Amino acid sequence: MQFRDLKTQYQALKPQIDSAIQSVLDCSEFILGSPVAELEEKLADYVGCKHCITCANGTDALQLSLMSIGVGRGDAVFVPDFTFFATAGAASILNAHVVLVDIDEKTFNLSPKSLEEAIKRVRAEAKYMPKVIISVDLFGLPADYPHIRRIAEQYNLKIIEDAAQGFGGKIGNQRACSFGNLGITSFFPAKPLGCYGDGGAIFTDDSKIAERLYSLRAQGRSKSSKYEHCEIGMNSRLDTIQAAILLEKLKAFEHYELQAVNEAAKWYTECLSETVRTPFVPDGFYSSWAQYTIMLKNTETRDRVQCELKKRGIPSMVYYPFALHQQKPYQGMGRSDAEFPAAMRAVKTVLSLPIHPYIKEEDVYHITQVILKNA
Ligand SMILES: *Cc1c(COP(=O)(O)O)cnc(C)c1O
């Protein structure tokens, strides 16, 4: 059994994908060929944003977003303590000051209450300028944007939505990647919409920021003249081949994959919700299920369940075994486990189960039986 079955997906889409790749080979426009702009237009349309700027990966998308609004030394960037390392790393590499914030117990996403406390603390200390909130749509579920946006407005902060795992998620009819001043996603193969290598994208409604992002992804070059540069940028582009693949994968994603993965999540929840803590999706929210993550009663149970699954050839993962404040680059900030009770509880008890649009109901049933016997 596969944790995220990319082989079955390829077999289902093989004729279209093979021909998309072949057509790029035939025209040989490997960098910024026409499929790249076509994809950017389709993605912007899907998300409901004016602009989409593709780039080399999700981490670059975060870094470019921060650069586009001038984040650097002296600025405080608020980041959830429980996320993939890149969310914080992208800010630290620009010498910004990362302020870690505890998560909500139920959703695993940024806790608005802890966020507001952290902003007040940083303001009172007056050492760093509160500038940006990077909120993460962890495991596919959009963060609490109605609440986070109110806080951002009150304290005059910008929001970058890290939807690397959240592409396809919704609150009401509004889609993920559109909830902040900027939104980013990743096309790493195992993400909800993945390519066959690395890739990423940034979304914004702000035309000035979009202009700057096109420049920043190409060494800060000027719009009018190719070898004239207005600022220091990066070299971060999405390959034409990846764009051509994504154009095909986006069709399948829209037509049936997103529904299929939601169906799979429902099968899990129906079987498991009385025995373990199944993912909480608030009313009006819709997840794209990058992960289906349960919580067991303690670490011992979690490890035993994982071991029993493994014995039967069922892969499972601990996303994440460490909170960010426990990671070496952030240990020096002197934050203790006690300041992040929800993140620590997650670290100790979470387990992510196989989920993808091609998983069969009988596989889910088989997995849940092992969990029910051992939880
Ligand atoms: C995967 C991921 C990223 C980074 O994306 P890459 O394409 O791997 O660089 C950033 N944030 C989160 C939450 C992620 O899951």
Image (cartoon, rainbow, N blue to C red):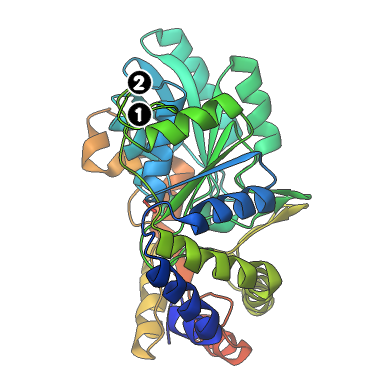
Asked if residue 37 is positioned above or below residue 110 in the image, the reply reads below
Instruction: Looking at the picture, tell me which residue is in the foreground, 121 or 4.
Output: 4
In the displayed structure, 316 sits above or below 359; it is: above
Mark sitting earlier along the chain (2/1): 1
Left or right, residue 56 beside residue 294: left
Image position of 351 with respect to 107: above or below: below
Which residue occupies 78% across, 52% down?
284
Give the residue type at disc 1.
Gly
Circle 1 sits on which residue?
A: 220
Q: Position of residue 176 (x, y in %)?
A: 63, 48
> Looking at the picture, which amino acid does disc 2 mark?
Cys
SS for dot 2: loop
The residue pinned by badge 2 equals 230
Quadrant position of residue 324: top left
Q: Residues within 10 Å of mark 2 (few under 14, many from 20)?
A: some
Contact check, label 2 and label 1, Cβ < 8 Å: yes
The image quadrant where one finds the N terminus is: bottom left
Return the residue nearer the eye: 264 or 108: 264
